Amino acid sequence: MRKYLWLSLVCVGSSLLSVFIYSSLWGSKKVVWTDEAGESKYTGLVDKLFNSRSNFNSAAPTNFTVAADIATPAVVNIKALIGSENSIFGGSLTGSSGSGVILTPDGYLVTNHHVVEKSADIKVTLADKREYKAKMIGTDQSTDIALLKIEEFNLPFVVFGNSDSVRVGEWVLAVGNPFNLESTVTAGIVSAKGRNINILGGGASIESFIQTDAAVNPGNSGGALVNTAGELIGVNTAIITESGSYEGYSFAVPSNLVQKVIRDLREFGLVQRAFLGVGIQDLDAETAKDLELPNAEGVLINRITKGGAAEDAALEVGDVIIAVNNAKVRSTAELQEYVGRFRPGESVQLEYWRDGKKIRNKLQLKDGNNIAGIARVRGDELEKELGFALRDLSRDEKRRMRVQGAIVTSVRRGSVVYDTNMQPGFVISSVNGNRVNSTAEAIDAIQSAYNSLSLDGYYEGEPDLYSYRFKKKG
């Protein structure tokens, strides 16, 4: 009997000890689940040893309504009409359609260059169906950005976000106004940053796109890419497709680059593009190993432009740029974007590898003609009236030709200058007998002349002086 009593006491004691241990280690943590009615229930227990939190955060999808409410009223439809001659029917109109984003309450808006290229008749339709004629403030082919203006006040608009802070995997909304279907909103995530897809063409183009999987179709070009706070982090520009419709890849110009471009267009009518004065290429693992670098992130300098900013700062072929103003640089696209945010004459601090050592160096950026200053003219101010465009001579051209002036870059067929047989490449050294040393001086002299013009100058490789005479007015 005493034997069974002792066994019972051992069983009860073991049970109480088990309950105590279970409660101490497990009892304070509970798993929360939700029933079909949406009510929270408690079931099971979570081991303290895993340091689990007492409450679990919901993984429910982000709510996009706030961002959509902010962005959709500020996204517009754009129709850009181009007149064309037709010998049989007497003329016709062609054009393109896209979207745009209002940036200020007084009517400044951004779109893509390719949407409004060569158009003199641009119509903007707001989300509430009001229509306006837009004025072209300026356009930049190298970034595919254009700035327009409509005459209205108290307009809905979006504010700029910081595209540098955008992270891969972050939710974004693509907002457009295609084909006058009113605003359309699609959601996706950021798939990649700093993408170069080689669609803009030209050696001076900047392609460092934000890639997303938000659905973007051709009519959405120039529309807004916004974060979940409704801030503009990009301007939708391109898709990669074989069918002509969205297939999962869309690309936007980062907002920090857009801000710089439109600021230049608004202030100067042209983009003040800065250059390092180098040829660059992406690194691969083999090259990084040969250079004894810790990884393959960075941009290799393969050429130094004579008279450029890099030469002035004593950079060398073989240097690997890894940062600009403390911002890491992983690819040529990123480097071009970072430098593209500055104006000629401004200074940046570069960080680069050379001979296994990390070096910091400050340099002053220059423009495409190796001038460390702001350009005050675009060069196409005479194109509409006289039919030709100009640019400054580069330092190398001045050295080779031993002449000062402005070089003709294009002559429009059928214009008054075309009738003189002037050819692109002609360097204007004097206007009506007065010497000119730059494009700004040449344009000012030509515009100031009352009627008759005499442009004297040279072609490279030819010693003879050429002179072209014509009248500004018929």
Image: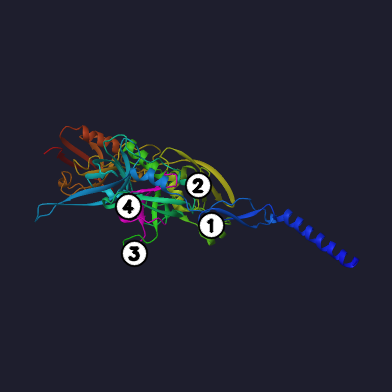
Colour scheme used in the picture? rainbow
Q: Is residue 301 above or below residue 269?
A: below
Number of residues whose C-alpha sits closer than 10 Å to that of mark 4, classed few (under 14), some (14–19) or many (20 or more) = many
Q: Nearer the viewer, residue 352 or 175?
A: 175
SS for callout 4 = helix
Compute the Cα span from label 4 to label 1: 41 Å
Disc 1 designates what residue? 35
Comes first in the chain, label 4 or label 1:
1
- What's under tag 1, amino acid-wise? Asp
Q: Secondary structure at mark 3?
A: loop
- Rendered position, 441 above or below 281: above
Q: What are the residue bounds of the magenta stretch?
A: 213-242
Counting from the top left corner in percent of width and height, residue 463 is at: 25, 46
Image quadrant for the C terminus?
A: top left
**C-alpha gap between disc 4 and disc 3:** 17 Å
Residue 242 - label? 3
Q: What amino acid type is highlighted by mark number 4?
A: Asn
Residue 180 placement, left or right of 143:
left
Q: Going by the picture, which residue comes out furthest to the right?
A: 2
Q: Are marks 4 and 2 in contact (CB under 8 Å)?
A: no
Question: Nearer the observer, disc 3 or disc 1?
Answer: 1
N-term mark: 2 or 1: 1
The residue that mark 4 highlights is: 220
Query: Is residue 418 rendered to the left or right of residue 221?
Result: left
Mark 4 vs mark 1: in front: 1
Mark 3 neighbour density, 10 Å: few (under 14) some (14–19) many (20 or more)? few
Estimate how packed mark 1 is, as few (under 14), some (14 to 19) or many (20 or more) residues with alpha carbons within 10 Å. Answer: few
Reading the image, the residue beneath label 2 is: 315
Under mark 2, the amino acid is Leu
